[in-house]
Image: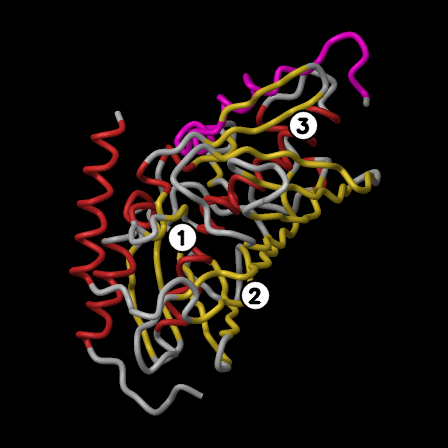
Amino acid sequence: MASGFKITPEHIALMKDVLIEHVPHAKALGMTVVNAAPGEAWLSVPYAENLVGNPETGVIHGGVITSLLDNACGIAVQLALPERMSIATLDLRIDYMKPATPKLELMSHTHCYKVTSSIAFVRGTAYHSDEADPIATCVGTFMLSANRSMPMTPEAAAEAMALFAQKKGGAA
Amino acid sequence: MSAETKMPDIEVLMQAIPYARWLGISIDQRGNEITTVLHFSEKLIGNPVLPALHGGVIGAFLETTAIAQLAFEFSGGEAGAGGLPKPIGLTIDYLRSGKPVETYGRAVITKQGRRVATVHAEAWQEDRARPIAAAHGHFLLKAADEPADK
């Protein structure tokens, strides 16, 4: 499926802009879209001391892998859809194969292999350099057009962020 | 419940985990009941339009909630962060979008084996009866069983 359109550099740029730059948590983790294809995405997260789950070994917390895979699955779904629409994670199952190696960058490869009228199915792997030697694997389902019918354009996202910052300032 | 005389201080354990500190997770421990609290900050946002918490953050919070409960019931009060149970697999159901407010978590150990425990965890915000997410997972209890490259 999803082979009827080509991924252009603009498409990837949009993914980076909308799905990373305007997603505060993805930005906070230093997430980057490394590569993209129809229905497929490759992301990375650099090693950082504040992401450590075990201070004795320096191993990254499983939650970072969860965030990476969740975000990467969402991007793979976007890349499987002929047009942008809002999506929401329904469920995500993660299996942890081995601890991440301290100091190494985390990579993920996610693939949206089926899209129905309302649901997208995705699977993915987190690894360091060799996908055949995974740190974790995941399967997930996403609901399409979950929250609003209009896709989030970079402008809309920026506007929302500004509003959000204002609201936060006012409340505090 | 394995803690007879000395209850483990899970808050101290949690604050020793850099990632838990970074996310803003603290522990509300009342006797033998543990509630995890995820304090809201802007970096937790996944969807700025709604705005909603990032699904990964909610997953990480539920995982931490499960680990906190396991640490409480199995540490005997002495375990360092290095001896924490390790997740084998975790399935997260996203039930409602997470609002930009405080989130609370509770976990129940559904089955405790010798090496593996099965845990169910829930996260909610204003209304305990309307959870925003639930997770169930398996955790490896003995660090010694962990395969290579630690």
Task: Tell me the SS state at disc 1.
Answer: strand
Q: Would you call the spot at circle 1 few (<14 residues within 10 Å), some (14-19), or many (20 or more)?
A: many
Query: Residue at coordinates 70% horizontally, 16% vertically from top-left?
Result: B77
The residue where tag 2 is placed is A139
Mark whose residue sits in front, 2 or 1 = 2
Q: Magenta residues, as a range?
A: B2-25
Name the amino acid, label 2: Val
* Residue A136 percent across, percent down from the top left: 55, 56
Choose between B10 and A120: the one closer to the eye: A120
**How many angstroms separate mark 2 from mark 1 (CA)?**
18 Å
Left or right, B140 with reference to A118? right
Is B95 left or right of B72, judged from the image as shown?
left
| Residue at the far bottom in the pictured view | A4
Q: Amino acid at mark 1?
A: Leu
Q: Chain of mark 1?
A: A
| x 78%, y 7%: residue | B5
Mark 2 nearby-residue class (10 Å; few <14, some 14–19, many ≥20):
many
Q: In which quadrant will I find the N terminus of chain A?
A: bottom left
On-image quarter of the C terminus of chain A: top left
Marks 1 and 3, how far apart at CA:
27 Å
Q: CA distance from mark 3 to mark 2?
A: 27 Å
Q: Is residue A53 visible?
A: yes
Q: Which residue is mark 1?
A: A106
Mark 3, residue position: B71
Disc 2 secondary structure class? strand
